[in-house]
Image: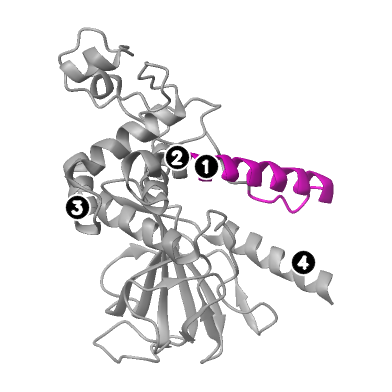
Amino acid sequence: MLQLAIPDAAASPNSNQASKGKEEAELQKLQELYKRVSLMTGLSWQAVAGLERYERTLSRAHPKTRPIRKDALVGIYVPPEKWSGELNPDTEDTNPVSIKVFQGVGRDGSGDKRADRNNDLDLLYSVAHQVRLQGTSPDDFAIGLWNYYHNTRAVQRILQFTKIYETFGKLNLSRHVFPLPVGTDYSYRSTWGNSRGWGGSRIHEGTDIFADYGVPVRSTSYGVVEVKGWNPYGGWRIGIRDLDNLYHYYAHLSGFSKSLNVSDVVQPGQVIGWVGSSGYGKPGTQGKFPPHLHYGVYRDRGLVEWAFDPYPMLRRWERSELKALKVHK
């Protein structure tokens, strides 16, 4: 399955260049696949991309229960019994006629008269075909997603991903930045798992980046604003969902960018608010701790979300930006 490359700080320029070239070639193949399925189904290529992207994030989160072949271009997984039909005695059936008789979802997208779960085009077309049975309008697309997944979270994610692709019109949206402008005065260390007492005993699910009041807080990624407002623990906070199905949590802000609203699409480096000390009380409570940004990341696993330590990512993004600044000096 296509994995978007993460640059290695120790890698040579030539190896990084080769990795980047391979990734761009694979993204080009994906784009062509999306556009082909778009023509076959009437869905926009962005909607097809959003659908496949969501499937990819689930497969990454559940590699044991959603196995994807190593050479797969798409990240879609359909269980054999769902592909061939629940009552089909042949779970490996590739005959489109018998699969249809047993009400399986498998379809022939490539035109070779086989509905093959190991064929990228067949996989993508089959799922897109099921989703578009209600129609191709935005409302019909949402209904089709619900009918296929029976999960409101899945519907929301795919619509969010689709909106991101519609906004930027491209697939290469993997760039990340450090949440505070590099070069400003800040400090941080790994604070994952530290104990917290306000509101009951709990662990610290994130990294605290200490800085002065008013230092700009930036989106680290491309994404959609999912939450904006007050939280008793996090104070004024913003939550942004990215294309890897990660929820980025920015807390203890002193304020938000006035132009930013829920469901808005953002990009790396865009200012979303400012460092503050809000939280631990009723709306407006401030000053119970030194000013800092609490940055947390949560992975959506389909039905639940789990926090993980963002410190390694923060270090990587910071090094990448500092390196770029040195190159351009």
Query: How far from the left and from the top, in percent, is residue 243?
Result: 45, 55
Residue 262 visible in this rendered orientation of the protein: yes
Q: Amino acid at mark 2?
A: Arg
Residue labelled with disc 2: 36
Measure the C-alpha gap from mark 2 to mark 1: 6 Å
Instruction: Give the residues drawn in magenta, as a range.
Output: 6-33
Mark 3 or mark 1: which comes first in sequence?
A: 1
Residue labelled with disc 4: 323
Residue labelled with disc 1: 32
State yes or no: residue 18 in magenta: yes
Measure the C-alpha gap from mark 3 to mark 1: 24 Å
- Mark 4 surroundings within 10 Å by alpha-carbon count, few (fewer than 14), some (14 through 19), many (20 or more): few
10 left or right, relative to 216: right
Measure the C-alpha gap from mark 4 to mark 3: 47 Å
- Mark 1 surroundings within 10 Å by alpha-carbon count, few (fewer than 14), some (14 through 19), many (20 or more): few
Query: How far from the left and from the top, in percent, is residue 162?
Result: 37, 57
Residue under the image location 33 percent in, 52 percent down = 158
Q: Can you tell which of label 4 and label 2 is closer to the viewer?
A: 2
Residue labelled with disc 3: 140
Mark 4 or mark 3: which comes first in sequence?
A: 3
- Mark 3 surroundings within 10 Å by alpha-carbon count, few (fewer than 14), some (14 through 19), many (20 or more): some
123 left or right, relative to 327: left
Measure the C-alpha gap from mark 4 to mark 2: 39 Å
284 left or right, relative to 48: left
Q: Amino acid at mark 3?
A: Asp
Query: How far from the left and from the top, in percent, is residue 1?
Result: 52, 33
- For this orientation, the residue located farthest to the top is 89
Instruction: Give the structural element (helix, strand or loop) at label 4.
Output: helix
Residue under the image location 25 percent in, 18 percent down = 84
Measure the C-alpha gap from mark 4 to mark 1: 34 Å
State yes or no: residue 165 in magenta: no
Q: Magenta region, mostly helix, strand or loop?
A: helix
